Image: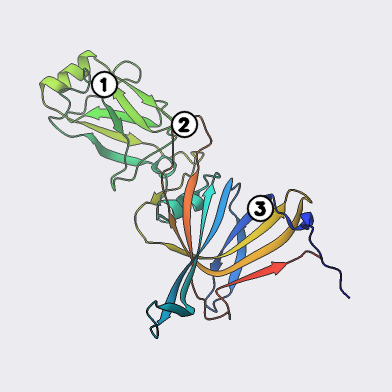
C-alpha cells in the first residue's frame, strides 16, 4: 500500500531568479546565437484562455455539461536594466543606421550652422546649435582646437573660439557669445557656416532610427534559477516571440532605468510547440 503524502514538498518551491536571452531566428526557423539581455528584475508569464461553454437545457435550470478550451495565448513581460543599443532598439522599435559615420571622424566643409537672418536671439536667448555635416548627420565628440573646427560668418569673417563662441565637445554643439563679431552677424542678418577637419580618433558613435519598425521577432531562452539552490532548474524555450515596448522608461529617476517589454509567444513552424519547458530537477 502506497503511503499517502500530505506534507508539501518545499524543494519544489521557487523563489525566482533568472537569465533571459534573445536570438535572431534564422531562415530555417532555428535560433542563432543567444544574446544575454542583462539584468531583469521583473519577468512574468501569463496564460490567457478562452473557453467554449455548453449548457444542457433539459430542465428548468440550465446546467453546464461541457467546457472546452478553444483558444489560448502565452505572454511574457520583462523589465530590462541594461541599456545597450540592442535593448534600446527593441524598446524604441529602432534599427541601427549602419550608414551613419560620426562626421567628426571624416570631417566636413562649409556646412550651414545658422541660416542667414537666424542669429537675432542666439547671443541673448541662450540657444545651442548642433553641429551637422552637409547631409544633416549629427556630430559628436568633436575636437574643437582651432585646427579642427572653424566657424565663419556668411561674409567669411572667422569667429574665435571662447571669444565669439564656445563648444560642448562631447555632444557637438555650439553656443554663441555676445561679442562684437556676433553682434555684426546679427545686425547684418548673416548666418554662420562650420568646417571640421577629419579626426580619426573621434568616437565612432551609433545612430538608431527610432520608430522605424514594428515588433521584433526573436527566439527566447529563459533560465529559471531557484534562490533556494542557486541552480538553473527550468529552461523555457520560446521558439518565436514578438517583442515590443510595454510601458514607461524613467530616464530621470532615483532608481535604475528599466525598459519594460511585452513578449507574445507565437507559433514557429520549425518546432512542434510554441514553447517548450526543460525541467532539470531530479
Tell me how far mark 3 sits from mark 2, CA to CA: 25 Å
The colour scheme is: rainbow
Instruction: Note whether residue 96 is visible.
Output: no
Across and down, in percent, residue 59 comes to 39, 83
Whichever of labels 3 and 1 marks the residue nearer the N terminus, that label is 3
Across and down, in percent, residue 52 comes to 42, 77
Q: Kindly indicate whether the residue at mark 1 contacts the one at mark 2 (C-beta within 8 angstroms).
A: no
- On screen, 127 above or below 211? above
- Residue mark closest to the camera, 2 vs 1: 2
Q: Quadrant of residue 12?
A: bottom right
Whichever of labels 3 and 2 marks the residue nearer the N terminus, that label is 3
- On screen, 221 above or below 269? above
Residue to which mark 3 is pinned: 18
Q: Most extreme residue toward the right, as rendered?
A: 1
The secondary element bearing badge 2 is classed as loop
Tell me how far mark 3 sits from mark 1, CA to CA: 48 Å
Across and down, in percent, residue 237 comes to 62, 67
Residue to which mark 2 is pinned: 253
> Neighbour class for label 1 at 10 Å: few (<14), some, many (≥20)?
few
Q: Most extreme residue toward the front, as rendered?
A: 60
Amino acid at each position: 500500500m502506497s503511503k499517502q503524502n500530505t506534507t508539501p514538498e518545499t524543494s519544489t518551491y521557487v523563489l525566482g531568479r533568472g537569465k533571459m536571452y534573445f536570438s535572431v531566428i534564422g531562415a530555417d526557423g532555428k535560433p542563432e546565437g543567444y544574446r544575454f539581455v542583462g539584468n531583469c528584475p521583473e519577468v512574468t508569464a501569463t496564460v490567457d484562455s478562452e473557453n467554449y461553454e455548453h449548457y444542457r437545457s433539459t430542465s428548468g435550470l440550465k446546467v453546464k455539461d461541457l467546457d472546452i478550451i478553444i483558444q489560448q495565448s502565452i505572454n511574457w513581460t520583462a523589465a530590462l536594466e541594461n541599456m545597450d543599443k540592442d535593448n534600446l532598439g527593441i524598446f524604441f522599435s529602432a534599427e541601427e543606421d549602419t550608414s551613419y559615420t560620426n562626421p567628426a571622424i571624416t570631417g566636413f566643409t562649409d556646412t550651414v550652422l545658422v541660416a542667414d537672418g537666424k542669429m537675432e536671439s542666439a547671443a541673448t536667448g541662450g540657444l545651442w546649435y548642433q553641429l551637422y555635416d552637409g547631409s544633416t548627420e549629427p556630430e559628436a565628440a568633436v575636437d574643437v582646437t582651432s585646427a579642427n573646427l572653424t566657424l565663419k560668418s556668411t561674409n567669411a569673417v572667422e569667429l574665435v573660439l571662447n571669444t565669439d563662441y564656445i563648444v560642448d565637445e562631447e555632444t557637438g554643439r555650439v553656443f554663441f557669445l555676445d561679442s562684437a563679431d556676433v553682434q555684426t552677424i546679427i545686425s547684418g542678418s548673416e548666418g554662420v557656416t562650420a568646417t571640421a577637419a577629419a579626426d580619426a580618433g573621434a568616437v565612432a558613435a551609433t545612430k538608431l532610427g527610432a520608430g522605424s519598425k514594428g515588433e521584433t521577432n526573436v527566439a527566447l531562452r529563459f533560465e529559471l534559477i531557484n534562490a533556494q539552490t542557486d541552480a538553473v532548474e527550468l529552461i523555457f524555450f520560446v521558439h518565436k516571440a514578438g517583442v515590443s515596448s510595454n510601458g514607461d522608461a524613467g530616464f530621470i529617476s532615483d532608481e535604475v532605468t528599466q525598459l519594460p517589454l511585452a513578449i507574445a509567444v507565437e507559433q514557429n513552424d520549425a518546432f512542434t510547440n510554441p514553447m517548450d519547458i526543460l525541467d532539470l530537477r531530479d
